[in-house]
Amino acid sequence: MELLTSLIDSANKFVHGWRVHLSELQKQLSRLDLTPSRKLGQSFLVDENVSRWIASQLQAGPDDTVVEVGPGFGALTEHLVGKVGRLILVEKDGRLAEFLADKFGDDVEVVHGDATEYDVRPHFAEGGIKFIGNLPYSSGNEILRCFLDAPSPVTNAVVMVQKEVAERFVARPRTKSYGVIGLMLQERWRPTMLKTVGPAIFHPRPAVDSSIVRFDPRPVDDLPLHSGEGFSSVVKQGFSRRRKQLHNNLPFEAEEWEEICEKLELKPNVRAEELTLEQWVSLSELLDPHPCAALPPPATESLDVVNENDEMIDTRPRGEIHEKGLLHRAVHIFLLNRTGNEIYLQKRSHLKDTHAGKWDSSASGHVDPGESYYDCALREMWEEVWVKPKDEVKRVARIEASADTDQEFIEVFVAEAKGSIRVHGKEVDCGRFFPVEVVERWVEDRPQDFATGFRTCFRAWREG
C-alpha cells in the first residue's frame, strides 16, 4: 500500500510540474505574440524531468563548450547553464533569440541564425565541442550534416528527432529504415537510440513520437581504410533505385560484378539494403580506388640524405633517416579556394609514422631520390588529395633544415586545386577548407594540434 501511495504521489507531482511548465510556456507565447511555426518545426518541450534527463546524457562539464540548436524557450538550456564552460544557443526565430538573451544574460551566447548554415570551423581552436538539440523535424538531417560531417569539432552529441528519423540513424541491414542517411552517419559515428517519448510532453503536440539519440565517435581503425568521398558516392549510387538489384545501380560489367560478389561474399542479385557498412566500404574501394591506396608502405621507402648545403650524400631507408635525425628533403603545398581566403588542411592518417592524427598542410611529403622539389609537389598533390593544379604552382618559401622542420629542407608551394579534393585513410583521415584567419588563431591557441613542419611552413608563408 505504501508503494502504491508513493507512486501516486510521484505521478501527481509529475502532472503538476508538467502543467506548471505548460502554463508558463503559454504565457510566454502570449507575451511574445508568438504562434508556434509549423514551417520552423516548433514544438516546445514542457516536461522538466525529460529535459533534465536529456541534458545529463551529454555528460558536459565546466571544461566543455556546448552548442545547443533549437533551444526554444530554454527547456534544455536551464539544465546546462552555469554547468559548462561556454554555452552557445543557435536559434532561428528572432523573437526567441531575443527572449533567450534576456532570460540567461551573460551566461550564454545567443546566435540568431539558421543552424544548417552554422560555421563549426572556429570551434576546432577550442579543442572540440559538444552538441545538443531538440531538432526541428523539417531540417534535422541538414543540421546534423552541418555539425557531424567529417572533419567535425564535435566530440559527442545528443539530439531529439522524430522517431522515424532516429530509426534511420541507427538502422541495420535488411530493414526498411536502412539507407543513405544512416550509412553516412555511421561511417564516422556510433549512434545509439536512448529513449522514445510521446507527443504529450510537447506544446503544441506533434503527430508523432520523438526519440533521443546519442552520437559517439567511431574509432579510426574500426573500418577498413577507404576514401570517405568515394564511400559517399557509391552509397548514394547504390540506393538511387532502392528496389532494383544493386548491380543495376552501379557501373559494373556482369563478369566484373560476379568477381566482386565473390570477394565480398554477396549474391549477384543482392539489393542495396542487404550490404553491411563494412561491405559498402569495401565495395567503394573496388569501384573507385584512390591513387594512394596502392602506394607501398612508408617503411619500404628510401630517401636521399643530404648535407647542410642540401647536397645529396647518401640514400637510406625512411625509418632510419627519422630515427637518426638525418637531413633530407620535403615539400608542403597549400591549396587555396577560388577566392584565395581559405586554405585546405588535412588531418593525417593514424597510420603515419610521424605526427599521426595531427593537422597538416593540404599535401606534403618527402622528395624521392632524383626528384625535384617542384615535381614532388605535383606528385604529392595527386597522391594525397587526388587533384592537379588549376594553374601554376608557386613556390612561396624555402626553409632550412632544423628541429622545427624535423630535419627537413622544405620548399613551400601554393596552388589552386583543379577539381574536387578527395582523400584516403591510408594517407589522410579527412580534411576541409578553413578561413586563413581561423587557422592563424587555431595555431596560436592550440599548436599541439598540428604537425611540426606545418607550423613552420605556415608561418613562413604568412610572414613572407
Image (cartoon, rainbow, N blue to C red):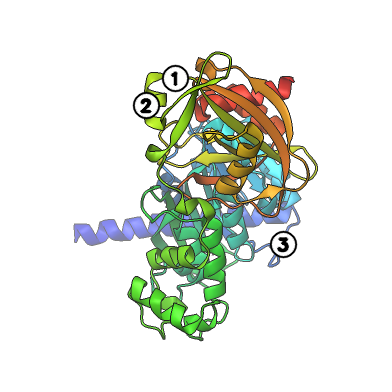
Q: Are marks 2 and 1 in contact (CB under 8 Å)?
A: yes
Q: Is residue 185 above or below residue 401?
A: below
Q: Decide if residue 270 is on the left or right side of residue 337.
A: left
Q: Residue at x 55, y 77 (%)?
A: 251
Q: Quadrant of residue 108?
A: top right
Label disc, if present, on residue 35 of the rendered structure: 3
Q: Decide if residue 275 is on the left or right side of residue 130.
A: left
SS category of the residue bearing label 1: loop
Q: For label 2, count other residues whose C-alpha is less than 10 Å away and answer few (under 14), some (14-19) or many (20+).
A: few
SS category of the residue bearing label 2: helix
Q: Residue at x 50, y 68 (%)?
A: 287
Label disc, if present, on residue 326 of the rendered structure: 1
The one nearer the camera, 418 or 152, is 418
In the rendering, at what x and y percent does residue 428 appear?
Answer: 51, 44
The one nearer the camera, 85 or 125, is 125
Q: Is residue 31 above or below residue 319?
A: below
Q: Nearer the viewer, mark 3 or mark 2?
A: 2
In the rendering, at what x and y percent does residue 255 appear?
Answer: 44, 82
Q: Earlier in the sequence, mark 1 or mark 3?
A: 3
**Residue underneath mark 2:** 320
Three-letter amino acid code at disc 3? Thr
